[in-house]
Image (cartoon, rainbow, N blue to C red):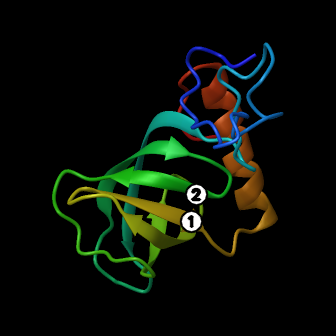
Amino acid sequence: MRRRFDFTPARLDGAHANDGLVDGPTHVGTERRAVSRLAVDLEAAWRLLGDTRPPQLVYLTDLSARGARVATWHSTPVKPGDRLELHAGGEPFEVTVRRVLGHCEFGVEFTGLTGDQRMRLVRTIGNNRVSPSGWA
């Protein structure tokens, strides 16, 4: 049975385009990504990798174990492929800009994570999934 709120297009033969993925009682709210994302409001700071200037304050609005969405208050001079340091309490994360989402937002992917950094991300995501609690 096709659900009323399912906006995926039907195939030409009349069958549902995503048969098996959205049918059934659990399709509402089911995430289809390999890594789940979490809407957050976490403070951090960034600067270009190797830059000696002080990092600029930003907020993360979306976080997963693979990347984040970064929001700033002013236009940022970044482009896809730029490598940045993302400072969030402990050891800075090395990230690569994957997408610029407007003048004041960009998406990054975590690169070269150590085991401790990965566990810190997982703990941060888990803690914030329960209640807003900042960085682990």
Task: Tell me if 127 is positioned left or right of 69 in this view.
Answer: right
Q: Are marks 2 and 1 in contact (CB under 8 Å)?
A: yes
Residue shown at the point (61%, 41%) measured from the top left: 37
- Across and down, in percent, residue 6 comes to 59, 24
Quarter of the rendering containing residue 23 = top right
Looking at the image, tell me whether mark 2 or mark 1 is earlier in sequence order. Answer: 2
- Across and down, in percent, residue 133 comes to 55, 27
Q: Quadrant of the C terminus?
A: top right
Q: Amino acid at mark 1?
A: Glu
Can the viewer see residue 92? Answer: no
Measured in 3D between alpha carbons, the distance from the residue under mark 2 to the one under mark 1, in whole angstroms, is 4 Å
Q: Secondary structure at mark 2?
A: strand
Q: Residue furthest bottom?
A: 50
Residue shown at the point (65%, 16%) measured from the top left: 3
Quarter of the rendering containing residue 81 = bottom left
Quarter of the rendering containing residue 118 = bottom right
Task: Tell me if 1 is positioned left or right of 29 in this view.
Answer: right
Residue shown at the point (66%, 19%) measured from the top left: 28
Q: Secondary structure at mark 1?
A: strand
- Across and down, in percent, residue 96 comes to 51, 74
Q: Nearer the viewer, residue 17 or 134?
A: 17
Q: Residue furthest left?
A: 74
**Residue 67 has which mark?**
2
- Across and down, in percent, residue 55 comes to 33, 66
**Residue 109 has which mark?**
1
Placement of 55 over or under 60, stated as above or below: below
Placement of 75 over or under 39, stated as above or below: below
Placement of 97 over or under 134, stated as above or below: below
Q: Amino acid at mark 2?
A: Gly
**Residue 89 has which mark?**
none
